[in-house]
């Protein structure tokens, strides 16, 4: 038996296979045959989706916390610039005619 060359599957393909597995209409053996993927690979993809499902809905990701800090800094900067513009309208280029 010859070994098959290593394949890289697209995210869309993996999602299609995992969703078919989650439906439960077919066994892993049937899905494996249909999609030409080993049953263990389907199980791994399925496990990855289930474990990462929280991230899909904006769970406790470090990026979300980082973004909150960045927004806070930007709001402070906007407030500072608004105060400077109100204090010195001629400096900001605004004219009252």
Image: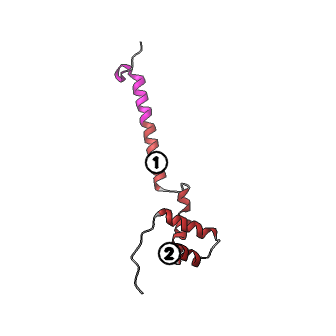
Residue 84: x and y, percent? 39, 27
Report the span colored magenta: 77-93
Residue shown at 46% from the left, 42% from the top: 72
| Vertical order, 61 against 50 (above or below) | above
Pick the front one: 42 or 62: 42
Q: Is residue 80 magenta?
A: yes
- Quick one: label 2, few (<14), some, or many (20+) residues within 10 Å? some
The residue carrying mark 2 is 37
Query: The C terminus is located in which quarter?
Result: top left
Q: Would you say residue 87 is visible in this rendering?
A: yes
Residue shown at 61% from the left, 68% from the top: 22
Q: Which mark is on residue 67?
A: 1
Pick the front one: 80 or 25: 25
Kind of element beneath mark 1: helix
Residue 66: x and y, percent? 45, 50
Of callouts 1 and 2, the N-terminal one: 2
Residue shown at 61% from the left, 76% from the top: 27
């Amino acid at each position: 038996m010859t070994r098959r060359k290593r394949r890289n599957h697209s995210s869309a393909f993996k999602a299609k296979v995992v969703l078919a597995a989650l439906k439960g209409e077919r066994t892993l053996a049937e899905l494996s045959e249909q999609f030409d993927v080993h049953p263990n690979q389907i199980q791994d993809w399925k496990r990855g989706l289930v474990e990462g499902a929280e991230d899909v809905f904006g769970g406790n990701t470090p990026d979300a916390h980082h973004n909150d800090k960045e927004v806070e800094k930007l709001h402070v900067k906007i407030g500072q610039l608004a105060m400077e513009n109100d204090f010195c309208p001629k400096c900001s280029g605004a004219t009252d005619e």
